[in-house]
Amino acid sequence: MIEVRVEVRPPWPVRLPGRGAPDGVLRVRGGVVHRLLHVGAEPVVVRAVRLASGSVLFGARGTSRDAAAAAIARLRFALGVDDDLAPFHARFRADPLLGPLLRADVARRVLRRPEPFEALAWAVTEQLIDYPRAAAIQRRIVRRFGRRCERSGLCAPPAAATLAGAAPAELQAMDLSAGRALALVRAAREVASGRADLDARDHEPAWQRLRAIPGIGAWTLEQLALAGQGRYDQVPAGDLNLLKLVGRLRSGNPLARAEEPEVREFFAPYAPWGGLAASYLMGAPADRLPIVRSPRPRGTRSSAPRSRAAAA
């Protein structure tokens, strides 16, 4: 096995996750982040730890130096270590709504997925259900179809090619609805075949192919873009939490719910950082937001069932 280490000095303050992910694939032990990634078919165990100097030290162990370096690059992307957020903070630091949140938490990032297909698959599982239930589905998928490293005890979500060959009924047996199970398999086939290239520089052709699949709508693609392709300009406007949040912020009524176009309009002034602005607002305590009179609800992470496009 070959060990590769890289020390990175982030251009903007960064905070690593303090605990593992609910789906079980990202783990934190003694302040060290661990992930199992695959470069092609080659498994690589990657680690990251924040040093006292503010730098982040990455280490990867694989059977080739190239694969280890590629895995480090993917974890760097997922953690947002190389993102320079100075322009975002400079522009909105004085914003009446967002400014106090930025000053209180300069290191916030959108926690991304190291693989865009992982973000796409998990977005499908999160449609229209509460997140704990979605995370349970994700853990079942990992146990049944995922990849494992016995030496490290880590696991990883399945590759697109694996889910492309799965029977929708198998996914349905894991508590995924019939429609979403079929949508996930069809999306996996598009990605595995190369017809939907999620790594291409131009994202729109892949989005167009995925959009043609019943059950893959605006919210799913915006989640893919934000969490899997690094697109801070994308806002998952159909997210139920955002619909409720914008409704309350605009009306002062704790029971109000905005429409999806209203959410897009609300975040338009924050372009091209709308996705990051939404992350700040959704993560803020209720007493830090103007007008809000009740605690932030624990709703679902997906969109309300007003239409098929909104629901997916």
Image (spheres, rainbow, N blue to C red):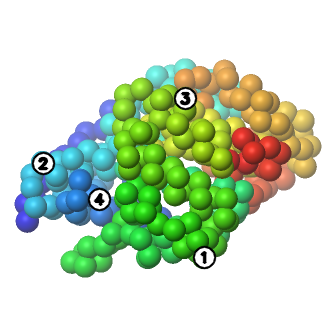
Residue at 8% across, 65% down: 1
Visible residue check, residue 132: no
Of marks 3 and 1, which one's residue comes earlier in the chain?
Answer: 1
Tell me, yes or no, whether the two marked residues, 2 and 1, touch with CB atoms within 8 Å: no
Q: Amino acid at mark 2?
A: Asp
Of marks 2 and 1, which one's residue comes earlier in the chain?
Answer: 2
Q: Position of residue 184 (x, y in %)?
A: 54, 56
Q: Position of residue 285 (x, y in %)?
A: 69, 51
The quarter of the displayed image where residue 132 is located = bottom right
**Label 4: which residue?**
37
Q: Residues within 10 Å of mark 2 (few under 14, many from 20)?
A: few
Please give the label number shown on residue 33: none
**Label 1: which residue?**
173
Visible residue check, residue 302: yes
Q: Nearer the viewer, residue 59 or 310?
A: 310
Please give the label number shown on residue 233: 3
